[in-house]
Amino acid sequence: MIKKRFGIDIDGTVTHPDSLIPYINDKYHLKLTLEDITEYELTNVINIPPKEFYEWFTESEPIIYSESPLAIGAKEVLTKWKEQFQLFFISARSSHLLDVTEKWFNKNDLHYHHIELIGSHHKIETAKKYEVDLFMEDKHDNAVMIHEELGIPVILFDTPYNRDSIPEGVIRVKNWYEAEKWIESWIKNQQ
């Protein structure tokens, strides 16, 4: 039997969605919590000029990504899946961050079949290229577009910044354990 191939976003999906917040708070002397982040585009939520924010973020990415904590349940579920499914991590991170990303996966003892850093949030072509059967994401518009374009289920990890309505076929979950449960049911229904 051919193993199902999962496309999996990294930041806010495998990493905890508040990973960036302590760094923002430290740099800009704020007291943000995840609940304050009600839009994916951070400069719409915090009063920092976009150019300044992106310069700081680009400079800080390697440190942030090397220290990001795992999302609750991610390691346990992904470890269970490493023999059962093909795990393709597809991220908007820039390709020059591949070494940092691979080291983070190794440090956290996370298995992967492939990591693709595309430097953009436009993941449809990459998901199509690798023929993923299902995608996991935290960015609302990505989840909807991937589902609508590819006709595959997309698991959307719930956060305050992605609570717009979703079509059938995009499945909102609170954590990796809920994702695992939904996928178990989905697999059974396909047999």
Image (cartoon, grey):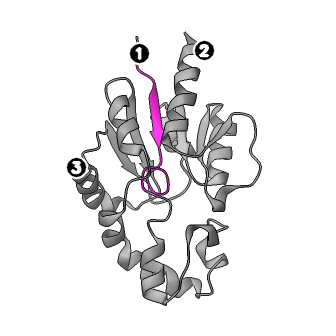
The residue that disc 1 covers is 2
Camera-near label (1 vs 3) is 3
Q: On the picture, is 142 further left or further right than 136?
A: right
Question: Considering only order in the chain, which callout, 2 or 1, is on the residue closer to the N terminus?
Answer: 1
Span shown in magenta: 2-15
Q: Separation of disc 1 and disc 3 at Cα?
A: 26 Å
Query: Which amino acid, mark 3?
Result: Asn
Distance in Å between CA atoms under marks 2 and 3: 34 Å
Q: Where does residue 176 sit, x and y in percent of width and height? A: 49, 41
Q: Amino acid at mark 2?
A: Asn
For mark 1, does the 10 Å Cα neighbourhood hold few (<14), some (14 to 19), or many (20 or more) residues?
Answer: few
Q: Is residue 77 magenta?
A: no
Say the numbered circle drawn on residue 189.
Answer: 2
- Residue 75 place in picture, x, y as percent: 35, 43
User: Which quadrant is the N terminus positioned in?
Assistant: top left
Q: Which residue is mark 3?
A: 106
Name the spot of residue 68 as percent of width and height, x first: 36, 62
